Image (cartoon, coloured by chain):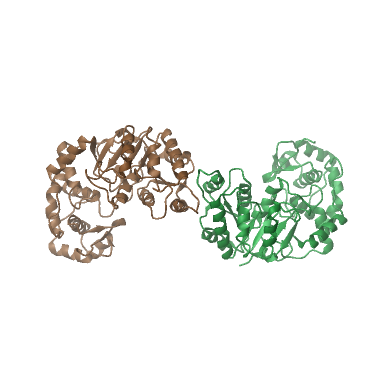
Chain colours: A green, B brown
Amino acid sequence: MTEAADGVRLTDAQRIEWLRLIRSANVGPRTFRTLINHFGGAGPALAALPDLARRGGASGPGHICSVAEAERELAAAQAAGVAFVALGEPGYPLRLRMIDDAPPLLAVRGNFAALTLPLVAIVGARNASAAGVKFTERLARALGEAGFGIVSGLARGIDAAAHRASLATGTVAVLAGGHDRIYPAEHAPLLEALLSAGAAVSEMPFGWEPRARDFPRRNRLISGLSLGVVVIEAAQRSGSLITARLALEQGREVFAVPGSPIDPRSEGTNRLLKQGATLVTEASDIVAVLRPIIGRLPDLPAEEPDMPVSEPMAEPGRDERNRIIALLGPTPVAIDDLIRISGSTPAIVRMVLLELEIAGRLERGGGGMVSLPPSA
Amino acid sequence: MTEAADGVRLTDAQRIEWLRLIRSANVGPRTFRTLINHFGGAGPALAALPDLARRGGASGPGHICSVAEAERELAAAQAAGVAFVALGEPGYPLRLRMIDDAPPLLAVRGNFAALTLPLVAIVGARNASAAGVKFTERLARALGEAGFGIVSGLARGIDAAAHRASLATGTVAVLAGGHDRIYPAEHAPLLEALLSAGAAVSEMPFGWEPRARDFPRRNRLISGLSLGVVVIEAAQRSGSLITARLALEQGREVFAVPGSPIDPRSEGTNRLLKQGATLVTEASDIVAVLRPIIGRLPDLPAEEPDMPVSEPMAEPGRDERNRIIALLGPTPVAIDDLIRISGSTPAIVRMVLLELEIAGRLERGGGGMVSLPPSA
């Protein structure tokens, strides 16, 4: 029962170029993919960055990661037992590569075999109740015995209980910071303990101290790695509910554990149940849903309208660029509408948006919405 | 927002005859209806009982309630402020008269207006948790304020909390014994307190001490009176789950309150949720489902195959009767199969079954199944 992916390895030089590109200013996983597709590789994309930023109206030159910086990070990673695996390489987690903002490079520490297990995420409240912790342990143990690996976020409460109960069978901790910045620090021994059968993964640079906004971003990896997400004890507006929402967007199964309506820690899970999440009182509730889809790839979310991989982008003239930029403002607008109203070709509009993005001016919302906040 | 029924009143003499018939041996609500339909009234049915019992092979003469006994019960009831309302009379609860084993006579004490409220049953564990009791109070209060009357069974735990929180807005206690045999005795003051805005109802004779098997029978009245049943904290194989099953059979809505899988008191409710009950964390979850169906009568369950009201029954000859009885045994068989295999007409088979029933020999299961246990 595995979920192993095949693929082709990058050369060492390519790996350096990939790392440089994703570590450069204003290049996120989606933009990385757009750049690679347009310029044919990370090298040409790196060379094009200054010009793109200038045309997008950058206030100054954005940081472009140097070869030396990239080599330093690779060396530090290697010294710490961390390997970088690139999107499309063998060893890159099968399901993660299907999400549209999959990290181009994933830094992995520990046992790669854990990433080929069918994975289930277990997430929940940091201030978990004793009942919640006990149920988490019971569930994670049973899922591990059934052949599933457990993914979680190394947080206090539910996360830690899920990891602890699956140390022997395989568990994956997804970090919001670099591999050398474990949060919370008190869980460093737990992380070490899980590495023999399991793994820790991160998309963030070495030395990156996780900030509040890195956790929601990290949560898409927790759901993206997994066949489904189980939420145990979650208040309204909690990170666990973000993970559940991302799971739905990624076409993953969502499970929730019921709890007393008197307990605020159950508000989020009970709401998920009302919205159609599968109710879980024992591991077999999860296994029955997930076993049939192991090895079957998820239905891909519709390709975002701004990222048709095959269509080449064109260079806009200055007037056309200014006209498109003038149509943008702080109110998010759909890219489709922007194309229609501008009268420009989709390829031209997309190039202008890429320029603005590399210049650090564009904001992307969900569902292909873009906006241009007032310059600082 | 009421659920009042119209109808025609019985004469005093008819009421005595109805009471005599339902208080006679081996006459339950279903047989009562069959007898009335076949013989055209309670008087002729009473006259026919000895002959029916003899033909059905009764070991001895079954008890037939005398006029004096019935008058004594009526007088005792009247003295205790209890009124008998007959199926089909105004004042008989609208929804209760739609169930196929509705009591021919319902003994009501308290405020009849409570029975015309749209009613919701709230049932649950006797050994309720503090959280369960608190949630019950909150829910019953909110439903009362929304114009619903609360039906329950006067038991310890959830039932008592539901009654207490709806004393002012109207609550109905359904008793498993006679009105003069309150169980548990410690709830006699609670019962008195609920009578001003609410009511207590029973189908059992005055002086009847409730036995264990009377509670499941009583539960069909709790669900039968109500638009829906809310189950709060119920273990596996609990009386509350019987009420939920009866509610489904009667075409009523079933609601359940989620709870931790660690707590055995949640096993029943979580299972109901898995089976499709509506998840409840606040009163509006219930109101949203029930408000649209107030005043609309439920879809009737399919008429039981042995009780077509219109078709007259026929008298079987002795050979035919013996042949049909010989086909019966301790293994339950569907009446439809019995008709087919016997080669007799449905009317003949039904009459033989009625005779056996009045003789106290027939056992009826669910879904039109009958069996003939070995004679004692």
**Residue B369 location (% of width, % of height):** 28, 59
For residue B79, what is the image quadrant?
Answer: top left
What's the residue at 85%, 58% (across, down)?
A71
What's the residue at 14%, 43% (across, down)?
B69
Query: Which of the two residues, B103 or B343, is positioned nearer the viewer here?
Result: B103
Task: Say which quadrant the N terminus of chain B sits in.
Answer: top left
**Residue B110 location (% of width, % of height):** 29, 34
Query: Which of the two residues, B85 or A327, is positioned nearer the viewer here?
Result: B85
For residue B144, what is the image quadrant?
Answer: top left
Left or right of A263? Residue B19 is left
Task: Say which quadrant the C terminus of chain B sits in.
Answer: bottom left
Left or right of A246? Residue A259 is left
Q: Is residue A41 in view from this perspective?
A: no
**Residue B140 location (% of width, % of height):** 42, 38
Marks counted in the figure total: 0
Left or right of B248? Residue A214 is right
Above or below, B46 against B88 in this view is below
Left or right of A119? Residue A40 is right
**Residue positioned most to the bottom:** A1
Query: Which of the two residues, A128 or B16, is positioned nearer the viewer here?
Result: A128
What's the residue at 62%, 49% (across, down)?
A126
**Residue A356 location (% of width, % of height):** 79, 43
Q: Is residue A29 in view from this perspective?
A: yes
Above or below, A167 against A185 in this view is below
